[in-house]
């Protein structure tokens, strides 16, 4: 590639003067190669590039046509299939549409030369056009688009859940079952999800060395801060890192006890993971979910509660305790306060107390009285 040329340019991917047995298939493959080269040059991860390419290939199969013949109606028909037949979440569909838009932007960018090459190869009226527009794609209306029924635990529900998790350790001990270590690990893991406001994947990817000291909280010893290395990533970007400061002494005590007395009993002490399986590997998010669902069902708790509800609970309960919102936002890794606000579901008692304080400020004690 000569200096000044863009990676992914059409003339770099298509060999001139060579007759192709299937010219349309060859052009499509060249486009995908060029798009891959363009994304590599931008520093995107291989798995992101591969996922995008798979999506474009699936879309081509759905339309049974080539990119230079795609139109907006193809996106509309495909979106109807995703919503009506496959029942995909709006956030998932929008992610697919974003990938298609990126591919379309690449093909229609004159700097890469694909439109002119298609005209030269297939006819003056044949060239790729933009197929994703504001009126046929899903707009990103909120930072969080999860299940609207999802909610945090009430304090009573949370206490019952954590107590039940602890009780499974005692039950395994008394029955002589082999699941004592796993039960203790799970009880600790759920406390970590709540105590540091983590997602399932973040907790599953924790290593023992991710805990460290916090000079401002020496009482927590080696567990004063938690370095989350696999936070939720933006599309096409690496995982976001953040440091979460420990704020709950009982959660710190639970982790310290697990690290000192339980984790060494698993079959692979050399493994870096904080939460190990009985076979010595790293626990998976699906395993966390399965144990959570079993405990939830045993307690008869509503299905609206998920492992992510523990993260919601962390935000809501700290808010009720008067912790600064900006601090909470940084702790959970939200870029905007709007996301933190969506996670906040405070109790009626808290809202009434806040109302009373507001009335006192506005009208004095007499005006605030019922």
Image (tube, rainbow, N blue to C red):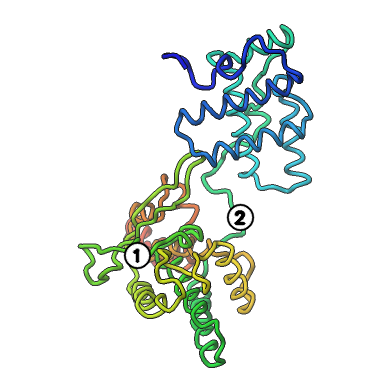
- State the image coordinates of residue 233 (x, y, percent, origin top left): 47, 46
Label 2 CA crowd tier, 10 Å (few <14, some 14–19, many 20+): few
| Residue furthest out toward the front | 18
Q: Are marks 1 and 2 in contact (CB under 8 Å)?
A: no
Q: Nearer the viewer, residue 216 or 285?
A: 285
Residue at 73% across, 31% down: 60
Marks 1 and 2: which is nearer the front? 2
Where does residue 243 sit, x and y in percent of width and height? 33, 55
The picture quadrant where one finds residue 62 is: top right
* 4 sits to left or right of 120: left
Q: Secondary structure at mark 2?
A: loop
Quadrant location of the C terminus in the rendered image: bottom left
Residue 310, placed above or below residue 146: below
Q: Residue at x 50, y 88 (%)?
A: 170
Q: Which residue is mark 2?
A: 148
In x, y percent, where is residue 92?
Answer: 63, 44
Q: Is residue 61 left or right of residue 154?
A: right
Q: Is residue 42 left or right of residue 61?
A: left
Q: Position of residue 238 (x, y in %)?
A: 45, 43
Instruction: Say which of 290 and 318 sits in front.
Output: 290
Q: Secondary structure at mark 1?
A: helix
State how far apart marks 1 and 2 are (Cα).
Answer: 39 Å
Quadrant of residue 53 within the rendered picture: top right
**Residue neighbourhood size for the residue with mark 1, other residues' Cα within 10 Å, grouped as few (<14), some (14–19), many (≥20):** few
Q: Nearer the viewer, residue 13 or 108?
A: 13
Quadrant for residue 102, please give it. top right
Which residue is label 1 attached to?
Answer: 366
Q: Is residue 150 above or below residue 108?
A: below
Q: Earlier in the sequence, mark 1 or mark 2?
A: 2
């Amino acid at each position: 590639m000569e200096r000044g040329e863009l990676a992914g340019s059409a003339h770099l991917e298509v060999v001139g003067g060579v007759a192709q047995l299937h010219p349309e298939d060859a052009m499509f493959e060249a486009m995908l190669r060029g798009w891959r080269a363009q994304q590599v040059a931008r520093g995107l991860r291989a798995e992101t590039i591969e996922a995008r390419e798979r999506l474009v290939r699936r879309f081509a199969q759905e339309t049974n046509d080539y990119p230079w013949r795609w139109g907006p109606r193809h996106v509309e028909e495909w979106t109807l299939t995703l919503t009506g037949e496959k029942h995909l979440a709006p956030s998932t569909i929008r992610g697919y549409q974003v990938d298609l838009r990126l591919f379309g932007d690449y093909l229609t960018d004159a700097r890469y030369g694909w439109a002119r090459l298609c005209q030269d190869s297939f006819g003056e009226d044949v060239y790729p056009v933009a197929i994703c527009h504001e009126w046929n794609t899903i707009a990103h209306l909120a930072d969080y688009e999860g299940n609207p029924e999802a909610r945090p635990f009430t304090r009573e529900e949370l206490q019952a859940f954590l107590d039940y998790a602890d009780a499974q350790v005692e039950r395994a001990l008394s029955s002589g079952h082999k699941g004592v270590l796993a039960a203790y690990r799970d009880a600790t893991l759920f406390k970590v999800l709540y105590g540091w406001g983590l997602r399932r994947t973040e907790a599953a990817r924790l290593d023992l060395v991710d805990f460290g000291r916090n000079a401002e909280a020496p009482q927590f010893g080696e567990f004063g801060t938690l370095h989350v290395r696999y936070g939720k990533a933006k599309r096409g970007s690496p995982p976001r890192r953040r440091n979460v400061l420990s704020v709950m002494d009982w959660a710190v005590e639970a982790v310290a006890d697990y690290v000192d007395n339980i984790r060494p009993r698993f079959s692979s002490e050399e493994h870096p993971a904080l939460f190990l399986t009985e076979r010595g590997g790293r626990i998976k998010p699906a395993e966390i979910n399965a144990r959570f669902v079993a405990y939830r069902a045993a307690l008869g708790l509503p299905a609206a509660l998920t492992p992510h509800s523990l993260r919601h609970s962390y935000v809501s309960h700290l808010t009720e305790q008067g912790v600064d919102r900006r601090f909470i936002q940084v702790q959970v890794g939200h870029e905007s306060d709007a996301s933190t606000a969506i996670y906040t579901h405070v109790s009626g008692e808290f809202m009434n107390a806040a109302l009373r304080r507001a009335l006192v400020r506005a009208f004095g004690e007499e005006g605030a009285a019922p």
